[in-house]
Image (spheres, coloured by chain):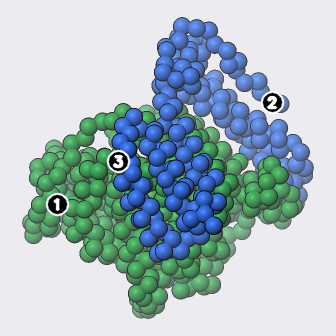
Amino acid sequence: MEIFGNIAFGLSVAVSPSTLGYCFLGTLLGTMIGVLPGLGPVATISILLPLTFALPPQSAIIMLAGIYYGAQYGGSTTAILINLPGESSSVVTALDGYQMARQGRAGPALATAACSSFIAGTIATLVIASAAPALAEFALQFGPADYCALMIFGLVTAVILASGSVIKAIGMILVGILLGTVGIDVNTSVPRFTFHIPQFGDGIDFAVIAMGIFGIGETIANLTRSGEQRGYVRDYKGLMPTRRDFKIFLPPALRGTMLGTSLGILPGGGPVLAAFSAYSLEKKLAADPTRFGKGAIEGVAAPEAANNAAAQTSFIPLLTLGFPSNAVMALMVGALMMQGIHPGPQLITNKPELFWGLIASMWIGNMMLLVLNLPLVGLWAKLLTVPYRMLYPAILLICCIGVFSINKSTLDVLLAAMFGVVGFVLYRLGCEPAPLLLGFILGPMIEENMRRALLISQGDFSVFIERPISLSFLILTAILIMILVAPAVRAGRERALRES
Amino acid sequence: MRPAPAPLRVPGGAVPSRSFVGYFLSLPWPGMKQRCSTDLLSGLLFIAFGAFVLVYGLQYPFGTSARMGPGYYPRVVSIGLILVGLILTVRSRFIESEATEPLLVRPLFVVALATAGFGLLIERAGLFAAAVLLIVAARLADRDFRPLEVAALCVVLIAFATAVFWYGLSLPFPLLPF
């Protein structure tokens, strides 16, 4: 079997003492930061990103994958222990997980989350390993017009699936795109919006924006929030689920995995959508739906499996098309580019050790969560009881050191402070910052492909509808927009968002 | 082409707030019974940013669709952003959205300034001094400032940062002024 040969190759890359060390460090730090209230995976990855810049590409990506899984898991931990989902994809986990915790079953709930995540991770890894090479081969046929249409499609789906106001999300994407135009124009070598500052020639570092908005901005936001008293669940003795629990949660975990695997591949999809769908599926299938919301173990297993599977398969569009389908993947693209790697269809053939190493390390990262992190649950729970006034100076310090280390640049730190203020203000105005990041990463790609497409067609816009791939993406986009405008769907979306 | 932003002078009858900016944001807008809505304010911000990019970008050649100049893409996108801002602004007159809440500006400024201070200090004075400044200044954002606790926090965090980032990951920053 070719897949297993490839995975074995990946494992041989990933299993060396140093890479295992980075993977472990990533998972550990990722969980540590991700478990802090109010910091989801996007914030966690942004904060920890610069730590990986000094590493060789392979180790950097492997550490990032570790951070990602750690942060995901950290989010579920807070969801279960204090009913405070660190990220939107664990909102659903909080529904039943926190109830389980209140019934004194916090341990099994956490273990269920970790085990179903691991099951999902294993299956999703196999899916990536088998589907990605084929998709990459298909993607080689993509011309510039097709890429352009794909990205617009992705942005539209991202807008529809974003929480909060659609029109504000569109605005934020456009702001992100405009921020992405700063720097020397690749085609004409004209410096754009550089304000005669030489460092802006290379554009604004995306890590600066990410860290400013998500690291510093969220710290400010947390500080201005009124100090709510939350019910901490301190009692988490008896970590392991019983044999009966296992029997109950296995089928939902598998169903969640399937749902998550397929939804994760969709552009604009990803963990959030997967978790919500998996939860409602379980509720429909259950013999007694009233148990949900009152500590049903299926209500933890299914969404956790789904969000982990989706988190993993959302790497597929990234690795095969070079297209980030959500904000976390946008961060990954940025990180890869900083390492001088441009993700795309050629990645598998040009850098097989990176590709397969990453896939293997995803699985290793999942295992680390299970083997090393689960026993540390007690430590994470303790971290939750540390007052915020002790935590935020630490977060700020890590952010600042990280931002400075990117280019050894004072200007970057000042910019990050500015983006922190901007991010906070936008956050208070109900503008989700995630679309901005997506626009910032996708903007330059859209411009480049659009220019290339129109250069080839000599300025004829019909190139976008003449190519079948591009046309199908545009038709899908049009359908999505029509659906969005349809009043019934809008009402449904609002209802769904309210429920969450 | 540049759309005129709505006048910023507003009539009185405002809800008093603790800070100047908070006070400013809590003022009612002309023709509105409510305080300034989040839709209106974000719309105006989008328009302002879009207009700035549009006007500043006029110096870059537009080119043609076949041979786009450096100004083509920013101009198209900034016009789009202005339109989005206009939709939000106009819509806020008809559909009520969440009103802006008075803003706590102390954490905002303190954290931003502390970060900026760190940036200005680290290269010349090294991590130890910059981190102390950052931690002490950041803690001022909190009303609960305990000198001993802050001192302990400084020691622990600097030790952690030195061990992990300087020694472990060998990130490029000096510890002490040279």
Residue receiving disc 3:
B148
For the residue marked with disc 1, what is the amino acid? Gly
Q: Nearer the viewer, residue A80 or A31?
A: A31
Q: Is A79 placed above or below A356 here? A: above
Q: Nearer the viewer, residue A150 or B174?
A: B174
For the residue marked with disc 3, what is the amino acid? Leu
In space, the residues marked 2 and 3 are separated at their CA atoms by: 55 Å
The N terminus of chain A, quarter of image: bottom left
Q: Residue at x 53, y 74 (%)?
A: B170
Q: Secondary structure at mark 2?
A: loop
Quarter of the view holding residue B37: top right
What colour has chain B? Answer: blue
Q: Nearer the viewer, residue B27 or B155?
A: B155
At label 1, counting other C-alpha atoms closer than 10 Å, the crowd grade (few under 14, some 14-19, many 20 or more) is: many
The tag earlier along the polypeptide, 2 or 3, is 2
Quarter of the view holding residue A31: bottom left
Q: Residue at x 63, y 25 (%)?
A: B89
Question: How far across and how far down the image is residue B81, in percent?
Answer: 69, 39
Residue receiving disc 1:
A107
What colour has chain A? Answer: green
Do the numbered discs 2 and 3 sit on residues whose CB atoms are within 8 Å?
no
Do the numbered discs 1 and 3 sit on residues whose CB atoms are within 8 Å?
no
Q: Secondary structure at mark 1?
A: helix
Q: Nearer the viewer, mark 2 or mark 3?
A: 3
For the residue marked with disc 2, what is the amino acid? Arg
In space, the residues marked 1 and 2 are separated at their CA atoms by: 60 Å
The C terminus of chain A, quarter of image: top left
Residue receiving disc 2:
B2
Question: How far across and how far down the image is residue B120, in percent?
Answer: 64, 52
